[in-house]
Amino acid sequence: MAWALLFAGGTWLSLPAYCSASARFAGPGWAGLELALLLNPPGALAAAWAAMLLAMMPPTLDRPLAAAGERGPGAAGLFLLGYGTVWMAAGAILILLAIALRALLPAPGAPLAVAALAALA
C-alpha cells in the first residue's frame, strides 16, 4: 500500500529535481532555497519521507521486529516508534541538506556534492 501511496501521492513540485543530476533548479542562492521550500512545504516533505519509509523499510525489519515481539507487543510497538522516529529525524536533516546544496551550489557541482554527502552517510 505504501508503494501505491508513493505513486499516487507524488504532488510535490520540485523535490524530484534534487534526485536528478541533469534537472534544472529554480534559481541559485537563497532565492532558490526559499522557492524550493515554498513549493515543498515541510509537512508534504515529511509525508513523502514517511511513505518512502513505509514502502522501503519493512523487508529489513522482520528479524529485529520478531526479536522485539518475543518480549511482548509493547516492546514491538516501542521498537517501531523508535525506529520511525530516528528515520524521520534523519530524513529531515537529509532533505534539508539536499535542498540547501542544490540551491546554494552551482548546478554542475550540486550533484557531485550530494553524491559525496551520500557516500559519507
Image (tube, rainbow, N blue to C red):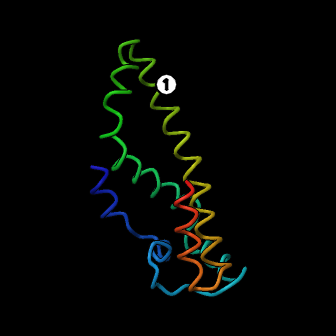
Q: For this view, does 83 lie left or right of residue 3?
A: right
Residue under the point 30% across and 40% down:
59
Q: How many marks?
A: 1
The amino acid type of the residue labelled 1 equals Leu
Classify 10 Å Cα crowding around label 1: few (below 14), some (14-19), many (20 and above): few
Nearest to the observer: residue 57 or residue 14: 57
- 99 in relation to 71, above or below: below
Please state the horizontal and vertical placement of residue 7, each as a whole percent of the image: 30, 64
Please state the horizontal and vertical placement of residue 42, each as a whole percent of the image: 59, 60
Residue at the outermost top position: 71
- 71 in relation to 76, above or below: above
- 54 in relation to 74, above or below: below
Residue at the outermost right position: 30
Secondary structure under tag 1 reads helix
Nearest to the observer: residue 26 or residue 94: 94
Please state the horizontal and vertical placement of residue 5, each as a whole percent of the image: 32, 56
Residue under the point 62% across and 55% down:
93
**Residue behind mark 1:** 78
Please state the horizontal and vertical placement of residue 56, each as a whole percent of the image: 35, 49
Residue under the point 60% across and 76% down:
102
Q: For this view, does 1 lie left or right of residue 21?
A: left
Residue under the point 29% across and 55% down:
3
